[in-house]
Amino acid sequence: MVFEGSAAALSHTGKVRSNNQDSGYSGSNLYVVADGMGGHAGGDVASSIAIRHLEDLDRPFASTAEAERVLRDTITETASALIDTVEQRPELSGLGTTVSALLMIDDHAVIAHIGDSRIYLFRDDQLTQITTDHTFVQRLVDSGRITVEEARFHPRRSVLMRVLGDMDAHPDVDTFIMATQPGDRWLLCSDGLSGVVDDPHTAKALAQGLTPQRTADVLLKQALDAGAPDNVTIVIVDVGGSHPVVVGTPTIVGSASTPLDFDVPAARPGRSSWLHPNRQAANEPTHFEPAAEFLEELIEEDRRRARRRRIGWIVGAVVVAALLVVGAFLAYSWTQTRFFVGADHEMVVVYRGIQQDIGPISLSEVYEETGIDLDDLDEFTRQAVESTVSAETLTEAREIVERLRATTEPLGVNP
């Protein structure tokens, strides 16, 4: 049975990279995104080989179980083809690719996934990530060491723990089957989209009800507006819906749309993995696949990085606290150069400091007593003293006191 729905695929180099190492496929039943890695040539070749091997599966299957088995076996055979390719072309050593594939069988979706490209399902206005990233940071998220938001900006967010490459002829591929229903909208994308456009904005674009092609264009624009530091590949599949059914020539985008300049070896199932004696550094790598034995070392390095970050925060907090203390000390020292005249227990006194308090902290204290009773002052002068009379210096404060004292002395009587 041919899948009834509509689909679209597009791929863009992005704003930073000089070539497109992504590939995408949109057919009648099969939909694939492959994000290549390994430099200018290696990434192109790896994702193209993956699409070439998988496109033969764009046909009806007798059952979902058969489709799942064939899809898993074909991806495993693709790994052998990558190994054979590097045997013939040693300069491609280190090539690899992610693969996220969707086979529509009747009212079910058969899914295969390895790497950090993603498959989303948009259903009932809710966006759900169906696949799990095979990345170092995802393991940190799963173990509770970092949050999902921290993973988006983690410096090792591109470190892959699983990938389809030339080092392992028996890749660990996730496969599973899901029921689908009319109105479902599936999104397959490379991390060039998911790494820069967050889920709320993606969901908003998918919810607009535009055709798959127009929706893909909207998502691509969002990625480009966000800087698009990596290649962007998008495949959108609608189940049923109001848009016309797309049947005809499959759409191939990205590096797979360009013929390779050499023959790809046929895959040899059951081949053993091997190591390259002269593994070359990739030119402008987009991913890195660590060997399993280095996982704990990477995790420990991430812990050290977190400790350094915490120490940095602590040091910063201490510095800020020290500056606040110094600032408070200098401010307090300044207040102690000021004086004013006021009342204390029915007496006129000279205060050192200023006429404000900070909560329970007083910024003034009695500096000297004058011996003048408030009762000896007239009502107006007494109110003025109780409200305090400011003075710039101690000398000025004492002059104010002498003027007050003069008002309390009786007038002289002539004999």
Image: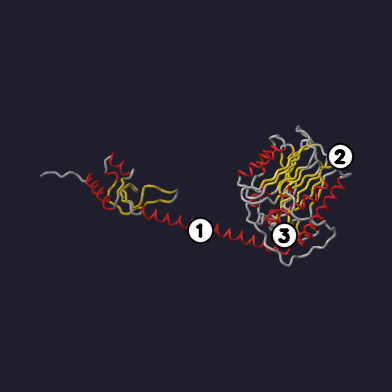
| Residue 387 appears left or right of 34 | left
Give the residue number, with chain letter if any, for mark 2: 1
Question: Which element is circle 1 on?
Answer: helix
Q: Hey, which residue is sitting farthest front in the picture?
A: 261
Q: Nearer the viewer, mark 2 or mark 3?
A: 3
Q: CA distance from mark 2 to mark 3?
A: 40 Å
Q: Nearer the viewer, mark 3 or mark 1?
A: 3
User: Which of the pair 110/76 is nearer the observer?
Assistant: 76
Q: Residue 308, image x and y in percent?
A: 58, 61
Residue 92 numbered tag: 3
Q: Residue 387, image x and y in percent?
A: 34, 43
Q: Residue at x 65, y 41 (%)?
A: 201
Q: Amino acid at mark 3?
A: Leu
Q: Hey, which residue is sitting farthest left in the picture?
A: 415
In the image, residue 10 above or below residue 172: above
Give the residue number, with chain letter if any, for mark 1: 318
Q: Badge 3, how many Cα within 10 Å: few under 14, some, many 20+?
A: many
Quadrant position of the C terminus in the picture: top left
